[in-house]
Each structure stands twice: as C-alpha cells, then as structure tokens.
C-alpha cells in the first residue's frame, strides 16, 4: 500500500479565475499526494472547476464543499479530512514550483524509508507581485541549518524578513492535531496563527533550501492588499490578540523557540500598529495605544521586549511627524520586499 506523504489543502472561495493554476502545479505526482480542494461556499464556478480536476485525477484530487466559514474554517476542514503524513496549505490564488515540490516529496520519502520523524519542514517562498519584475525570495539560511534535521537549540536569530509564514511550512499532520489547532471562522489573517500555535509541539525541523511556494499578491480585492487590510483592521487586531494570548499562556521551555515566537509576535504587533497609524483616525490611534498598554499590563517584561525593539519603536513614533515617519518606513519596506 502506497503511503500518502502529503495532504495539500487548497482553501477556495470564488477562486474560479485562478484555481486551475494552483491545481496544475500540484497534480500528477501520484498517490503519494492527496489534494483536498475545500470549496468554502463559493458562488461562482469554483466547485465545478475543482470537480473537473477530481474527475481527471481520481484518487488524487478530492473536492469538499461546505458553507462559507472563511479561510480558517476551510483549513480546519482540510485538516479533519487529511490522511497524509504531512500537511501543506496552498491558497487557491497561489501555486508551487513543480521541480521544488518533487524535491520535497523525495525528501519526505527518504524520511519515511529511514523511519526518520521530522515534525516541520521549512522551504522558501517567493513573492509573486503583480507588475513587479524582480521577485523577492524569503530564505532561512543563517537562521536554520541547511539540508539536515535539527532541533530548536540549533536555530539562530531570525532576520526581520525571516519569520515563518504559512507558505514556508509543511507540518507533520499529527503535530497539528496534537496542538489542537482550530482556527477561528469568518476571520482573515489566521495564517499567522497557523504559523504560531503548533510550534510548541514541534521537536524536530528540517530546512530544505528550495523555492517552493509562489505567493501571489497585488490583486486589489486580495485580503493582504493595504486598502482591504484597513477595512478589516478589526480582524487583524483579533488575530494579533489571539497570538499574544497564546504566547502569554503557553509554556515554552526552549529558550530559542521562545525567542523566535517573541520575534514573530513582535512583528505582527508592529504590522497592526502601522496599519492603525496608516488609518490615522483618532479612534485608530487610540486602538494602537490600547494594544500596547494592555500588553504592558499583562506582561511588563514582554511589553518592554517588543515595545523597545527597533520595529516597536518605529511603529510608535509620537506626534504627526513621527506618524509620517512610520508610514514612510512602511512604504520603503513595501518597495524593498514587494508585499502589498
């Protein structure tokens, strides 16, 4: 019996214009890969398109239709149905590099053959921004040992770009289940929780230095487009608070994992602060101050660690001039990295 190495969960909501690109990058690797397209209550032809792939690739592509519950709900559903040893989430408007995916599958097959248990495999991802010729690739060399299995004790300091976004992660499926991962429904930006909550269950990691995931950004209706994020600030702040709650209440004994979690949550707090400054209303600025004052009340040490980091300082510059400087720094980062 062939082992299903990877369950690929493809959350899809009204994704008809681009779903084929994602699925074309994933099909044809045989029974070691199961592709679970979770149609999250789409009102266009997403489900019908996904069904054509299921018919052409029986036993490889499955379509799961459900009422709309949001990105997190679709991932929850995919996880519940997954039978693979490992799980990868590929959003319907993104895709993977097929050669890199083949390398990943070969690596996983080697783990199985050697009875070598790895909890988390990290790969690179590439920002595919509309209209931007030069692509930015996020790699993890320097922070993670390349090409070998290691523990958190072997990690080094992560750079400002090197937080482990969902696109870089392939979890052992049981790790997600043991962590009790349950993402909130009808909430955007839950990928930050997916990339944070299970990490305390990760004991062994492997960094495969291949450019696997192609992260497509730049559509004006996309959740990570700045204008859309400003309209959904309440959801960004909800996820931010859930991440803080997790860090404050979860016992993490490994010093380097703890350092990484603070690094990532500090970045998310900085992003929330920048967006509130960018919104610029009196209420938004009060919300930024509340975010930091509540953190100070909950954990003064954690507050000092995040607030007085370089990122924390630049997102909390006082006065109109300081706020303009914060937005200017954000614009520079947008141009340098290529995010929305």
Image: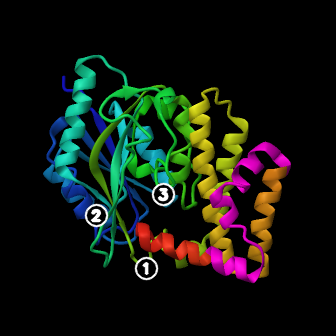
Assign the magenta stretch its main secondary structure. helix
Q: CA distance from mark 1 to mark 3?
A: 18 Å
Are there few (<14), some (14-19), or many (20+) residues within 10 Å of tag 1?
A: few
Give the colouring mode of the picture.
Answer: rainbow
Tell which circle, 3 or 2, labels the residue nearer the N-terminal end: 2
Query: Magenta span has 309?
Result: yes
Q: Identify whether 16 is placed above or below 248.
A: below
In this rendering, would 259 be left or right of 130? right
Query: Who's the residue at 83% across and 58% down the image?
Result: 293
Dividing the picture into quadrants, the one containing residue 205 is top left
Residue at the farthest right position = 297
Q: N-terminal of the two: label 1 or label 3?
A: 3
Q: Residues within 10 Å of mark 2 (few under 14, many from 20)?
A: many
Question: In the rendered image, which residue does mark 1 sit on?
Answer: 220
Q: Is residue 39 visible?
A: yes
Label 2 or label 1, whichever lies nearer to me, is 1
Per the rendering, the mark at residue 71 is 3
The reply to whether dot 3 and dot 2 touch (C-beta < 8 Å) is no
Quarter residue 45 falls in:
bottom left
Compute the Cα span from label 2 to label 1.
Answer: 17 Å
| Residue 49 percent location from the top left of the image | 24, 63
Where is residue 197, by image quadrant?
top right
Q: Residue at x 21, y 46 (%)?
A: 100
**Disc 3 from disc 2: Cα separation:** 15 Å
Q: 118 or 31, which is in the foreground? A: 118
Which numbered disc flags the more N-terminal residue, 2 or 1? Answer: 2
Bounds of the magenta segment:
297-326
Say which element carries label 1: loop
Residue beneath the point at 55% across and 72% down = 330
Nearer to us of marks 1 and 3 is 1
- Drawn side of residue 194 relative to residue 95, left or right: right
Q: Which residue is mark 2?
A: 19
């Amino acid at each position: 019996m062939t082992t299903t190495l990877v369950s690929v969960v493809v959350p899809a909501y009204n994704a008809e214009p681009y779903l084929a690109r994602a699925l074309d990058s994933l099909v044809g690797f045989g029974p070691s890969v199961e592709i679970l397209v979770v149609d999250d209550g789409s009102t266009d032809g997403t489900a019908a398109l996904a069904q054509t792939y299921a018919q052409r690739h029986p036993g490889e592509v499955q379509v799961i239709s459900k009422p709309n519950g949001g990105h997190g709900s679709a991932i929850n559903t995919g996880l519940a149905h997954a039978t693979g040893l490992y799980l990868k989430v590929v959003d319907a408007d993104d895709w993977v590099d097929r050669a890199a995916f083949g390398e990943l599958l070969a690596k996983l097959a080697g783990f199985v053959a050697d009875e070598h248990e790895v909890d988390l495999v990290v790969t690179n991802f590439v920002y595919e921004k509309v209209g931007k010729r030069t692509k930015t690739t996020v790699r993890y060399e320097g922070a993670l040992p390349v090409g070998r299995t290691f523990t958190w004790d072997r990690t080094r300091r992560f750079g400002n770009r090197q937080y482990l976004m969902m696109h870089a992660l392939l979890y052992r499926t049981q790790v997600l289940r043991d962590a009790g991962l349950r993402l909130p429904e009808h909430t955007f930006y839950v990928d930050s929780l997916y990339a944070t909550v299970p990490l305390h269950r990760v004991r062994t990691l492997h960094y495969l230095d291949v450019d696997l995931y192609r992260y497509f950004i730049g559509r004006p209706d996309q959740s990570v487009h700045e204008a859309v994020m400003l309209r959904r600030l309440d959801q960004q702040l909800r996820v931010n608070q859930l991440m803080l709650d997790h860090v404050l209440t979860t016992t993490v004994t490994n010093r380097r994992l703890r350092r990484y979690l603070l690094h990532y949550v500090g970045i998310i707090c900085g992003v929330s602060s920048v967006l509130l400054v960018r919104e610029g209303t009196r209420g938004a600025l009060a919300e930024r101050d509340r975010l930091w004052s509540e953190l100070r009340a909950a954990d003064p040490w954690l507050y000092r660690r995040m607030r007085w980091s370089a990122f924390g300082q630049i997102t909390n510059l006082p006065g109109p001039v300081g706020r303009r400087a914060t937005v200017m720094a954000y614009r520079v980062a947008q141009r340098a990295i290529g995010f929305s």
